[in-house]
Amino acid sequence: MTMQPLDKREGFIWYNGTMQPWQSTKVHVLTHGLNYATSVFEGIRIYNGQAFRLQEHLERLLHSAKQIHLKMPYTVKELYEATSQVISANNLTSGYIRPVAFKGAEEIILAGHNCSVNVAIAAWQAFESNRQHLNERGINAEISTWRKFPANVAPADTKTAGIYMMAHTVKQQAQANGFDDAIMLDMADNLTEATTSNLFLIKSKQLHTPIPDCFLNGITRQEIIKIARHSGMQVEERHIHVSELPYFDAAFLTGTAIEMSPIASVVHEQHKHSFELNHPVYLALLNGYQRVTGN
Ligand code: PMP
């Protein structure tokens, strides 16, 4: 099955306040956001015709914008309404929503004070043919040679385009090395997250997850912690050193797009740590998450 290029789809994209035909929603090559990554975005899922945790995602979008001094011309409430319009204009009951805000092409001067801030919201039926396969066999990950930068190097708690240049590089490197994904360490050799998802580890009945002090505290991550605590599980948010990998029975990743995915193995310095698939703690949390999303 060949994938339809995103820019060749039919439908409507909300762009700066009005609904535009999908294929004519374009930007100029001198767009400030394209040249300097003055751009922030979100990734949201549609379940049963509703955007899941929309308020939280839009609040994070505005937070990301603020962190890079991008003056958002719309409120969360306005964007909430616009997103609902996009879902119904494109007749979607399930799929993916991509809001993006970026500086325009009025000038290419770095500070870009005269640049407009443009906001688009696109939504479509996402293509997920590979996910079931990955969930069945588990993700094979490597520990990346790239580190996660400390939070005072770049705004780690945001979805700003610049940060994803590194996520892209790490993912490309992992795939070139024959892995599905990679987990990055912080500067003190603690586990952080994968390229676009958060990490959880299981020991017996306990759940362990790294403290999000230099990476995104994902909305799915927060949901999983809530479900675990609600069902009486012990959750430890702490620094987890890479040398602790052999201590754990199972591991999994969470994120809006992948939802939950078990990790089959993690390779660190030529050493392969294999994990149990279908661990009862993982299955209980998966069940809980599916109940929350209604999917
Ligand atoms: N970390 C990164 C770098 C991500 O891109 C994502 C996906 N947004 C996540 C974690 C998971 O976040 P969420 O659960 O909010 O999708």
Image: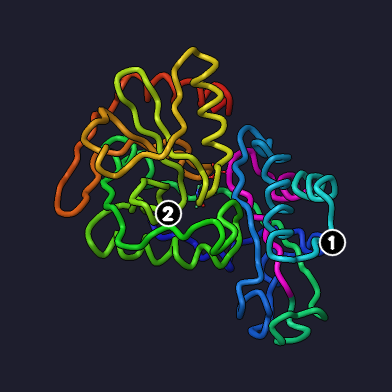
Q: Where's residue 281, x and y in %?
A: 37, 20
* Number of residues whose C-alpha sits closer than 10 Å to that of mark 1, classed few (under 14), some (14–19) or many (20 or more): some
Quadrant where the C terminus lies?
top right
* Number of residues whose C-alpha sits closer than 10 Å to that of mark 2, classed few (under 14), some (14–19) or many (20 or more): some
| Number of marks | 2
Label at residue 195: 2
Q: Quadrant of residue 108?
A: bottom right
Label at residue 73: 1
Residue bounds of the magenta highlight: 85-103
Q: In the picture provided, is 262 more to the left or to the right than 162? A: left
Q: Residue at x 73, y 46 (%)?
A: 59
| Of the image marks 2 and 1, the number of the one nearer the N terminus | 1
Q: Where's residue 226, x and y in %?
A: 56, 24
Q: Is residue 41 visible?
A: yes
Observer-nearest residue: 267 or 58? Answer: 267
* Amino acid tagged 1: Pro
Q: Where's residue 13, x and y in %?
A: 72, 60
Observer-nearest residue: 164 or 132? Answer: 164
Q: In the picture provided, is 36 more to the left or to the right than 209? A: right
Q: Is residue 13 visible?
A: no
Label at residue 9: none
The relative height of residue 123 versus residue 133 in the rendered view (above or below) is: below
Q: Quadrant of residue 134?
A: top left
Q: Residue at x 44, y 47 (%)?
A: 128
Q: Are marks 2 and 1 in contact (CB under 8 Å)?
A: no
The relative height of residue 211 versus residue 288 in the rendered view (above or below) is: below
Q: Is residue 87 magenta?
A: yes
Residue most toward the front? 188
Asked if the beta carbon under badge 2 is closer than 8 A to the nearest atom of ligand 1, the reply is: yes
